[in-house]
Amino acid sequence: MIIDKIKELLVTKVISRRSFLKSSALSGIALLGLTGCASEQDEVVDTSTVEPIEEPAPVAPREQNPISRHACPRNCYDTCSILCEVKDGKITRVSGDPGNPITAGGLCVKMNHYLSWVYHADRILYPLKRVGAKGEGKFEQITWEEALDTIATKTKANIDAYGPETVLKYNISGTVGFVHNYGLSQALFNKMGTSILVGSACAGSGSAAIPYTYGKNAGVDPEEFVNTKLYVSWGANEAAVNVHTVKFIKQCKENGGKIVIVNPVRPGLLHYADMFIQIKPGTDAAFALGVANYIIENNLQNQAYIDAYTVGFEELKTTASEYTLEKTSEITGVPIEQIIEFSKMYGEIKPSVIRIGFGMQRHSNGGSMVRAITLLPPLVGAIGKDASSGYVYINSGYWISYAGIQGNDLRENPNARKINMNELGKALTGELETTKDYPISTLLLFNSNPMAIIANGNRVRRGLLREDLFTVVADIFRTDTADYADIILPASTFFEYEELCQDYMGWYLRHNSPAIEPLGESKSNCQMFSELAKRMGYTDPIFDMTTEEAIKVCLQAENVVKQGITYDNLKEKGWVKLDLGVPYGDMKFPTPSGKIEFYSEKLKEAGHHPVAAYVPRVESEDGSPDLFKKYPLTLISAHTKNFINSHMHNVPQINELIEESAVFIHTDDANERGITDGDSITVTNDRGTILMVAKVTPTKTQKGTLLSYSCHWPKLVEGGKSVNELTPDRVSDMGGGPTFHTNLVEIAKA
Ligand SMILES: Nc1nc2c(c(=O)[nH]1)N[C@H]1C(S)=C(S)[C@@H](COP(=O)(O)OP(=O)(O)OC[C@H]3O[C@@H](n4cnc5c(=O)[nH]c(N)nc54)[C@H](O)[C@@H]3O)O[C@H]1N2
Ligand SMILES: Nc1nc2c(c(=O)[nH]1)N[C@H]1C(S)=C(S)[C@@H](COP(=O)(O)OP(=O)(O)OC[C@H]3O[C@@H](n4cnc5c(=O)[nH]c(N)nc54)[C@H](O)[C@@H]3O)O[C@H]1N2
Ligand code: SF4
Ligand SMILES: [Mo]
């Protein structure tokens, strides 16, 4: 009763929650569950269903054996610096580099088991050829001679018969090393003239959206989080996927900063949160515009800054005015008083950082959401003025490049057919328009496990089953994808080859020296591809380039040279921090107007609202009412702390942690379907059905939204199909990104 009364007061009279609490005699009453808003954290943030945060524990290296220095290339924000002790040619101990400020001596839940990964009994140590049916997983050992001859002969024959663009090179981010993923390893495919792989299974939408506003992307240094006074975790899950920044966020709080979370589900960082905004999935653009509207209506914007550095404020004002408190609340599910309180905090607290997560943008409207969020920092003057102010998204890619080592000049057909990596299934089955007449004849795949990580697994499987498709997979393990190969090549791990890495959030360059010789007959990607190039008859000098030479080319970047970073000093220490100054500190924005663009003509030309707009997701109550009747639940399949993409699922210690593929279900949704905690359930949509175990929870997720983790190996889960069996292979609105979370399903007791 009393709670209802308070709710009514807050909603109807639109009293700020904090001022209400301060002035009310009722301020001692625990408001748990009222709105999820938590300015008085201890009273109102419910963390009961949130796992404890496990910060990396430093492990001191023993140093009695020789130490080698490494950079973790696992497509993780942290890119830890690793120390290995090696004895008699074997790694005996793996630990985090205590000297590096990000790694600070500790790795993570997963990579504390790196030794079990490197020396796993199931490692592929020799080339293999298929002897059973496609996908059956029956292989026989062959020599490298036979493997390379078979691949060269078959690929050449397919190029001669059908053209080079029927060859598809496919790699994502199994390792994100500069040389062995993005750089030298691409030269062979440029020379062949294969189809060009475009888009991103990861963060394409946000990466395309941000430059519309700022002309480029330059984020805050995570070590600066300690100095900010407001950290907004927007669609991110730091405690699981970016564990080394948690200490900086915690310090921000200890220094008096506020932590706000915007997420449809409760992430680990909730333990430190002052406010939890539990938004409906895919509605963040409406929330951002609603906040902008409140800020402008209440004159909380920084008008002098806006006048000096931005264009399109009037258009923003008009557009945002459509997002009234009532409308914003209705679309997003966020209570009006919370929209008000967050807007006030964001308008008043300086400096502030918005952390734009990757997970949030994996929706059909992901680009639109990120674009809308990018309009907030300049509204309050947060860009370019302070090192601990602005936003952070990704910090790689704007100060060092691998373009010089990709052999781009070898490509005779720069306008070759483009294939979006998210549409692999359609491309292989010929359901993609551009592959109808010229089917893919040859798939050369490395650094990726699409059977586990690409959407619409059923379609990917059908494609890989094609008898007339010649498939080569280079991997460390016999993944589900490798099971469909005609030839499997044994890849060595980064502990066995040299590499250059760049953090994707921190401002570091890191060097990786090999600790041991390649196990068995395994080879690095570059080594196997340069040998294959020679079998193909290619004699270009790039195929003789060493990794050391390639790294030296990358280090010629202006910023790097200017700061005195050389191959030798980088190699000796293992890492070096670049000084990038205040992000956008020169107040130069390479947009068409040269200013921050609240209004973007380019965005309009690309078919979007020139300011920003809430666009309903393709699969949602608003976007597809008929489908919604059949499949009323949105399934978010986010990343987990226990494994990284599909890595580590096959490592025994990690497999034990995972137990089963769980799906969190709101109590109301479970009750409506007679599902109880621990039940085995089916999760279904028109793309397929998988088996999962129900985790029924009153708070971890919200009604209408399911949460599961990705990406399990299909063959290691019950039923042999994991979450990407269900996800859609549609491409997002900007940048060719994925739409894993725009995924309607229904659940039932199995
Ligand atoms: N449902 C759902 N699906 C998702 C996501 C999601 O949020 N939800 N996230 C997506 C994201 S963000 C990403 S980035 C992708 C990742 O997709 P991938 O990059 O394909 O996945 P990984 O599991 O990281 O790596 C694939 C393989 O690389 C191999 N590998 C590692 N090192 C080497 C090497 O040195 N050489 C060779 N040849 N192989 C090596 C590993 O053994 C592994 O089998 O997944 C996407 N899939
Ligand atoms: N341990 C571990 N670390 C990893 C990885 C891993 O698999 N495991 N993967 C690495 C890779 S490749 C990547 S790209 C990053 C991913 O890093 P993140 O983007 O931080 O991780 P995700 O778990 O994909 O998604 C983050 C959050 O987005 C939320 N979300 C989903 N939909 C919406 C929405 O509509 N609005 C809002 N506001 N939030 C939403 C999810 O609930 C989730 O909590 O992590 C990297 N680090
Ligand atoms: S996966 Fe990420 S947190 Fe773990 S060791 Fe590698 S870089 Fe560090
Ligand atoms: Mo990713």
Image (tube, helix red, strand yellow):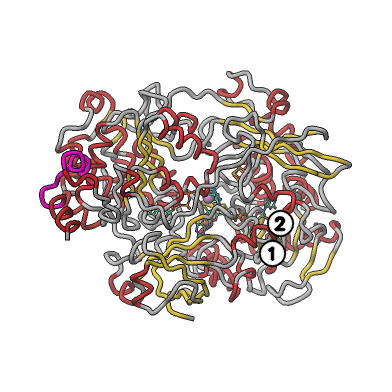
| x and y percentages locating residue 426 in the rendered image | 52, 67
| x and y percentages locating residue 689 in the rendered image | 49, 76
Along the line of sight, the residue nearer the viewer: 222 or 189: 222
**Image label count:** 2
- Residue drawn at point x = 34 percent, y = 66 percent: 704
Task: Specify which label sits upstream in the sequence, 1 or 2.
Answer: 2
Decide if ligand 1 comes within 8 Å of the CB at mark 2: yes
Residue most toward the right? 88
Residue most toward the left? 13
Q: Which residues are magenta?
A: 11-24
- Are discs 1 and 2 less than 8 Å apart at CB? yes
Q: Secondary structure at mark 2?
A: strand
| x and y percentages locating residue 701 in the rendered image | 38, 60
- Which class describes the residues within 10 Å of circle 2: few (<14), some (14-19), or many (20+)? many
The residue to which callout 2 is attached is 475
The residue to which callout 1 is attached is 482
Residue 15 colored in magenta in the image: yes
Relative to 277, is 101 on the left or the right?
A: right
**Res 548 visible:** yes
Tag 1: amino acid: Ala
Relative to 525, is 732 on the left or the right?
A: left
| x and y percentages locating residue 397 in the rendered image | 53, 36
- Which class describes the residues within 10 Å of circle 1: few (<14), some (14-19), or many (20+)? many
Residue 547 colored in magenta in the image: no
